[in-house]
């Protein structure tokens, strides 16, 4: 049965990195995989920068920022429609962390509503190091706002607390009680805890962790780099 996963969350929460890792993992398992890039505001971490890698793994990318695929803002709706019309095993929607990004998802409300029970999951990616996500109350306020714009209901939280290049296991430790409290207040389960493999392994060795507030550990390889990093590397070469 086709599985559709929507990733929402605050700007800079790590949605695109998680989407890319999920897609590559699924493709490695032999699943027919498609990624829909609806993040219109993030010019620094772009899924379209990894077109070659996605092509090599036979993952289809639908993104208006990838001119090579002939996808523009005009024909984007038809391209997105392939997520529902074609026979994929996994479709991942990477949604921008603002009202405009969530609203771009809402136009497909009827397509999502037509999916069979159990086919759709909506994951709220939480990084407590980002503004508006530092407390359980802020997490739930932002979740409610995004649900309203997107016309979707969050089914799970993902603890992706990190400080990018300065990340450590301590970020996950600090995120754990905050995401746990948000889960307890809302009744929404924690489905994943994500992070670079070494930090995730260190965090999981901590005593006192409750499995239901950790979810499934999901190690992340780092693919997303700020767009200016490439220019800096090239300049030094």
Image (cartoon, grey):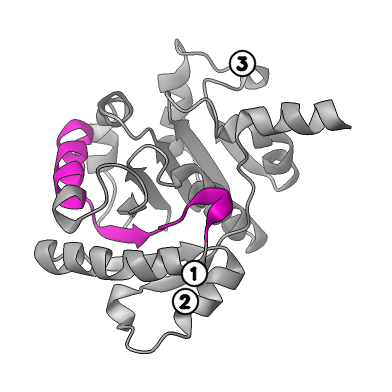
CA neighbours of label 1 inside 10 A, class few (<14), some (14 to 19), many (20+): many
What residue is disc 2 on? 203
Q: Is residue 162 magenta?
A: yes
What residue is disc 1 on? 169
Residue 47, picture quadrant: top right
Q: Earlier in the sequence, mark 3 or mark 1?
A: 3
Q: Distance between the residues labelled 3 and 1?
A: 41 Å
Label 2 with label 1: CB-CB less than 8 Å: yes
Give the percent coordinates (x, y) of residue 204.
Answer: 46, 80
Indicate left or right for 235 with 94 as reference: right
Give the percent coordinates (x, y) of residue 215.
Answer: 36, 73
Which range is magenta? 139-167
Q: Is residue 116 above or below residue 200?
A: above
Q: Is mark 2 on a helix, strand or loop?
A: helix
Instruction: Say which quadrant the N terminus sits in.
Output: bottom left
What residue is disc 3 on? 70
Q: How far apart are marks 2 and 1 (CA)?
A: 5 Å
Which-is-in-front pick, marks 2 and 3? 2
Residue 66, picture quadrant: top right
View extreme (bottom): residue: 207
Q: What element carries label 3?
A: loop
Q: What element carries label 1?
A: helix
Which-is-in-front pick, marks 3 and 1? 1
Q: Is residue 36 above or below residue 220?
A: above
Instruction: Say which quadrant the C terminus sits in.
Output: top right
Q: Is residue 75 above or below residue 223?
A: above
View extreme (left): residue: 185
Label 2 with label 3: CB-CB less than 8 Å: no
Residue shown at 42%/63% (left/top)? Answer: 171
Q: Distance between the residues labelled 2 and 3?
A: 43 Å
Q: Can residue 153 be seen in this view?
A: no
């Amino acid at each position: 049965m086709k599985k559709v996963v929507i990733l929402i969350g605050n700007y800079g929460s790590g949605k695109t990195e998680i989407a890319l890792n999920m897609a590559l993992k699924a493709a490695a398992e032999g699943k027919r995989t498609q990624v829909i890039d609806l993040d219109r505001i993030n010019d620094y971490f772009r899924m379209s920068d990894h077109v070659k890698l996605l092509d090599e793994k036979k993952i289809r990318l639908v993104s208006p920022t990838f001119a090579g695929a002939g996808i523009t803002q005009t024909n984007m709706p038809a391209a997105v429609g392939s997520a529902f019309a074609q026979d994929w095993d996994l479709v991942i929607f990477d949604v921008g962390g603002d009202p405009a990004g969530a609203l771009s998802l809402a136009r497909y409300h009827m397509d999502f509503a037509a999916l069979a029970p159990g086919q759709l999951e909506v994951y709220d990616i939480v990084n407590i190091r980002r503004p508006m996500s530092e407390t359980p109350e802020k997490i739930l306020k932002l979740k409610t706002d995004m649900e309203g714009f997107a016309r979707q209901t969050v089914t799970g939280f993902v603890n992706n607390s990190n400080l990018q290049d300065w990340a450590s296991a301590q970020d996950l430790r600090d995120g754990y009680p905050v995401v746990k409290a948000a889960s307890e207040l809302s009744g929404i389960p924690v489905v994943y805890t994500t992070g670079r493999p070494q930090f995730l392994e260190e965090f999981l060795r901590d005593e006192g962790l409750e499995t239901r507030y950790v979810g499934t550990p999901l190690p992340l390889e780092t693919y997303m780099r700020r767009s200016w990093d490439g220019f800096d590397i090239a300049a030094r070469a």
